[in-house]
Image: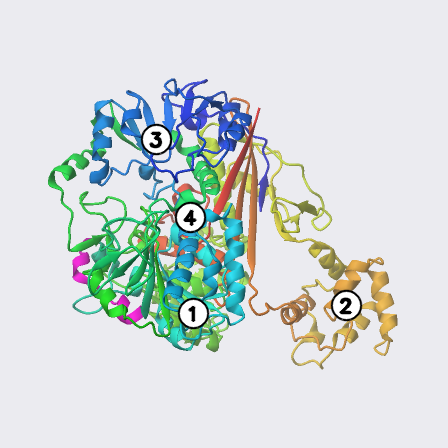
Amino acid sequence: MLQAFKRTGCRLESHLSRRRWYHKSVLAIRREDVNAWERRAPLAPRHVKQLTHLGYKVLVQPSNRRAIHEKDYVKAGGIIQEDISAACLIVGVKRPPENKLIPNKNYAFFSHTIKAQEANMSLLDEILSKGIRLIDYEKMVDHRGVRVVAFGKWAGVAGMINILHGMGLRFLALGHHTPFMHIGMAHNYRNSSQAVQAVRDAGYEISLGLMPKSIGPITFVFTGTGNVSKGAQEMFNALPCEFVEPHELKEVSRTGDLRKVYGTVLSRHHHLVRKTDGVYDPVEYDKHPELYTSRFNTDVSMILVAICDISADTGGSIEFMTECTTIDSPFCMYDADQHIIHDSVEGSGILMCSIDNLPAQLPIESTECFGDMLFPYIEEMAVITSNGSLTDKYKYIQKLRESRFFSSSIAVRTGYLAGNPFISKASIECGSVQDTLRELVTEEQPCGALLCLSCYCVAEEEAKQGEYAQSLAMDKKKKVLLLGSGYVSGPVIEYLTRDPSVEITAASVMKKQLEQLTKKHKNVVPVVVDVTEDEEKLSLMVKKHDLVISLLPYSFHPLVAKKCIDSKVNLVTASYLTPAMKELQESVEAAGITVISEVGLDPGLDHMLAMECIDKAKKVGATIINIPAGGALLDSVTVMDFFPGLNLEGFPNRDSTKYAEPYGIQSAHTLLRGTLRYRGFTKAVGGFVKLGLINPEPCPILSATAPSINWKELMCRHLGLKQSAKPDDLRDAVYNKLDKDEGQLEAVEWLGLLGDEPVPVADSIVGALAKHMETKLPFGPGERDMIVMRNEIGIRHPSGHLEDKSISLVVYGDDKGYSAMAKTVGYPTAVAAKMVLDGEINTKGMVIPLTKNIYGPILDRVRAEGIVYNVQSVIKQ
């Protein structure tokens, strides 16, 4: 946790108007008036408040349909006014009516014109004829080409709610009452929390075994890994669910537990193969998708009951959907045999839901989320038209209109325009979707019903963030040596082996763990060896590889680094750059290799999130200021109440001021990095300290060759009591040693440290305590871990305004999947390793992720893996 606290303010000129806009500019939020269901706005009252505090005048067109009441905008400083012609920028969500466009103005909205969509060409003509400067949210991208402003998550959330409702109706039409009948459409709920409760209620009934046995286990497939898919999965997780690998779906559909539902996340490499040899090459596929076929229906799918096409790209990834469904009429049936679509949930076929304005069903949360993303980027918006003509970047639109080149043989997925501007990314269905569906659907619905959620959405799914962005030239195999086989190794291997050119050698002393890893992942060769004891074997293995990833304890990294120096092989590790590693700096540089450290969670993501914020502040000329300092570590505990519902406390991590120079924030008066724990943790650990249990020194009486000893005997020895001391005498002695602290005594007794349980064999007392606590504090059935990280940064802007910026990261583990710790350490490490393999990181020497060329791509790519953070700012005078 970083707390370089700054009371910061920022003038909007910093974001909005370095070039064209000046103090007291007028902005307007237009009324959404094209669709009756459109209740969103591009900015929420809190964003209006920030703008007005910076001296901007914000006009808000009145609307009785808008979900957020006008009085909230007025309270925030907005002016309710019909006439918005005085505004220099007019922002909306969807396209305005053509007759309401004001000539020679700057507009920002989703125009849906970048693929020359025929329905919106008259709008584009009107924009051009009126000399309007059009700013399209779809073309707001970062340095990786990934969209930064979108409603994606809320489309996924609403889509998932809707299709669960639709499944209830469909199963009822087939003669089955299911718990899904009690879930309504997304717009029936005031907010997503109410919807989550409804889904949980249905899930409770499922967990009681109330799903009809005739249906069999229900399986869900999420096609995509971006924000849309994550939103859908977030709602899916409210059910009693278990995620499995795609190849395991068929088995769970036959033998799975009826008291839960099953899900899998499908990427292209899971089902796409070259027609000639059955191999998947991501680079070739992006260039020549016609050479590939999908084995979805043979390798993954069972009986297809429903498809929720959240991308709602007509004629795209679901090629037979020529029209979207609507919130009023959300479902239709597609009969693959007859190629007929009919508006019903009855009859034969597949239930379809393809609503193109899903976030409008959750308008308040969608508005607030979208506004958070939009606010910092207004100046950087991509302009499609200006001064009555298409800008150079978008002149292809006219050519597209003239040629009308839309391929009928390739299903086109909503995506970014790359290479040939006339064709976007080819979808998962190469060839005919109809042919696949005919094989999946029968009139009878046997066990193993499948729901497929198509979660590809404009330029934010794997077409931008996944295999294409990470794929390598396939000229040779990349060999990676992975040292260690613990929890973190799973995400590392899973991520790297998405590229078939990467071969991994996994070396560990844990034979069973290696067997599990090689069974689950392809291109992994197991080697059972203790590299900390067999240095010769380690040297031989390092020589044969292009990159080493060390997941060993940090104390062994210098040994591994020396072997990498000798063989001139690059090294990646998630651990701290320790003094012992720093001593190798000159040798690493002389060898011409890259050694990356601190690319896990802490250290790792904490650095990256802090540096992203700090660099943005510096870009506008701001400086970082301070937070009051702490004292002794465990004596400087502070209640942390920034996450409602979590009873947290925080305490400092050693001397954090040494990070001022690497972070480039010498202006900060105080820099504090700390640890978050549940309330009471520090008190309990303080008790262990008093009792001498946090002692790392060697303890011979706990060695494997020493006689067995129990905790009572060890505590008596520590406190100078006889081994035959009575339990009450020992308890009194411990109580006095703890300064008569009842809470600390309770923790000691609960852990059984005064009882007859044997002390585990270990090198030290603290090592024995750690092993003992592992047996006392395991996860129970259905339990999972959680990662919470919080950065709070105070910024002073050149104008004198102060800004308090907070960055929050909360990640949950997956039941029977990867833990939160494994994901937040493993995925950043894997991304950094892939960047080294691809040549994206080529700096020689010791490297930590404090520069934008490193932390930027890592943060972008881990976001696609579900590691998503939230940024909030409070601007003060």
> Rounded to the nearest whole Å, what is the CA distance between mark 3 and mark 1?
58 Å
What kind of residue is marked 3? Ala
Looking at marks 4 and 1 on the same chain, the residue that comes earlier in the sequence is marked by 4
What kind of residue is marked 4? Lys
> Rounded to the nearest whole Å, what is the CA distance between mark 4 and mark 3?
21 Å
Disc assigned to residue 108: 3
| Disc 1, SS | helix
| Disc 3, SS | strand
> Rounded to the nearest whole Å, what is the CA distance between mark 2 and mark 4?
46 Å
Which residue position is annotated with label 1? Answer: 538
What is the magenta segment's predominant secondary structure? helix
Q: Is residue 284 above or below residue 726?
A: above
| Disc 4, SS | helix
Read off the magenta span: 287-300
What kind of residue is marked 1? Leu
Give the image quarter of residue 549: bottom left
